[in-house]
Amino acid sequence: MRDVIYLEQIEQAEALLKPQRIEVLRQLAEPRSCTEVAAALEQTPQRVHYHVKRLVEAGLATQVDQRRVRALTEGVYQATARAYWLSPALVGRLGLRRAQDELSLGYLLDLVEQVQSDIAGLDRTRPELPSLGVSGEIRVDPERRAEFFAELRTTLQDLFGRYGGASGDAFRLAVACYPHQEEQDE
């Protein structure tokens, strides 16, 4: 089972984006038969088999084994990945690309789309892909926001200047800074 499968075909998205199939796929995180999934979801085996068949056709699940149950042969299936990532290309770009204003939400969305596309294109069969993910929360008073953004830009430009030579392994560095929505206490 892979960690992530990047879905670029509309048929795969259509197969995945049905609530019943998502539930079946969750059950297939571990190898299971349609009968076992049906019992867990309180559905008929025939109904589950229909959904599993569509998931297999779309490459979202695979038959990993089969076993004899009484006089029948029963398939054992498993999801092909732990997560499925939908390509923004499935919807396509509506309208023109936003202006390259680095402080706009449109620019951030374009950046995230580029990062998603880049990650999807990596050779995930390599055992060690050197990468780094860092996430954190910073609190900035509104009157110091411009100062913070300027210092962040200067720091990153310094890194690009120091390590932006023509030799060595190429890495893409993308930094996203956006408002964090705090969860409301109920």
Image (cartoon, rainbow, N blue to C red):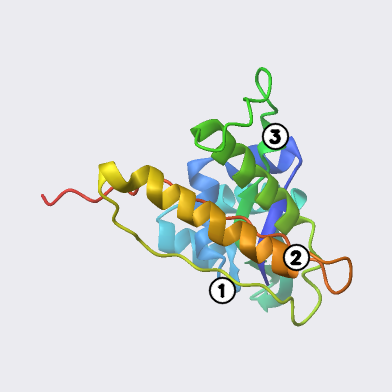
Q: Mark 3 falls on what kind of element? A: helix
> Which disc, if any, is residue 90?
3
Q: Amino acid at mark 1?
A: Glu
Is residue 15 in view? Answer: no
Which corner quadrant of the image does residue 40 belong to?
Answer: bottom left
Residue type highlighted by circle 2: Phe
- Is residue 167 visible in the rendered image? The answer is yes
Name the outermost residue toward the left: 186
Q: Residue at x 76, y 49 (%)?
A: 57
Residue 173 horizontal side relative to residue 149, left or right: right
Name the amino acid type tagged 3. Answer: Leu
Q: Position of residue 163 (x, y in %)?
A: 74, 69
Give how far across and how far down residue 52 sits, in percent.
64, 54
Mark 2: few/some/many CA within 10 Å (<14, 14-19, 20+): few
User: For the residues marked 3 and 1, what is the alpha-carbon distance in whole angstroms?
Assistant: 28 Å
Mark 1, secondary structure of its residue? loop
Foreground pick, 153 / 63: 153
Q: Which residue is mark 2?
A: 171
Q: Earlier in the sequence, mark 3 or mark 2?
A: 3
The quarter of the displayed image where residue 143 is located: top left
Question: What element does badge 2 sit on?
Answer: loop
